Image (cartoon, rainbow, N blue to C red):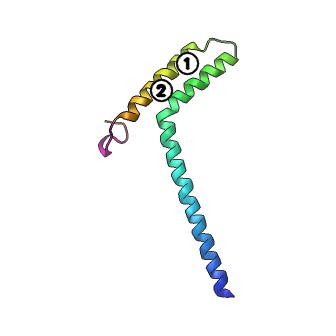
């Protein structure tokens, strides 16, 4: 009986570890996507907020389009570990 309990605890611990690894990978992917498309999302959100507030959101839409073009260019750029942080 004690052997069964120990085995169950180990399986539970293994499942929890796998879950934590999956959550960490999703978080890293989300950070990367947000870094790439963050300005675009902020610009589009600002444009929608301005339009809902009765103001003209054309400038914010243009800024979002510019940020989207920059994100597309950055996404197509070949990178290596020398310029990984974008400080190069």
19 on left or right of 75:
right
Labelled disc at residue 68: 2
Residue at (48% x, 37% y) in the render? 35
Question: Can you give x and y, in whole percent of width and height, for residue 42 in the image?
Answer: 56, 28
Q: Which residues are magenta?
A: 78-84
Identify the mark nearer the N-term, 1 or 2. Answer: 1
Circle 1 packing at 10 Å, graded few (<14), some (14-19), many (20+), is: some
- Image quadrant in which the C terminus is located: top left
Mark 1 and mark 2: span between their CA atoms?
10 Å
- Image quadrant in which the N terminus is located: bottom right
* Secondary structure of the residue carrying numbered label 2: helix
State yes or no: residue 88 in magenta: no
Circle 2 packing at 10 Å, graded few (<14), some (14-19), many (20+), is: some
Residue holding disc 1: 61
Question: Can you give x and y, in whole percent of width and height, for residue 22 in the image?
Answer: 55, 56
Question: Can you give x and y, in whole percent of width and height, for residue 8 in the image?
Answer: 65, 77
30 on left or right of 73:
right
State yes or no: residue 80 in magenta: yes
**Vertical placement of residue 32 versus 23, above or below:** above
Labelled disc at residue 39: none
Displayed quadrant of residue 2: bottom right
Residue at (60% x, 70% y) in the render? 13
**Vertical placement of residue 73 versus 10, above or below:** above
């Amino acid at each position: 009986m004690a052997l069964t309990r120990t085995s169950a605890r180990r399986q539970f611990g293994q499942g929890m570890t796998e879950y934590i690894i999956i959550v960490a990978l999703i978080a890293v992917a989300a950070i990367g996507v947000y870094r790439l498309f963050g300005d675009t999302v902020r610009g589009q959100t600002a444009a929608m907020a301005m339009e809902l507030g009765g103001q003209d959101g054309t400038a914010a839409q243009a800024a979002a389009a510019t940020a989207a073009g920059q994100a597309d260019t950055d996404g197509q750029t070949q990178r290596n570990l020398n310029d990984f942080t974008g400080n190069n």
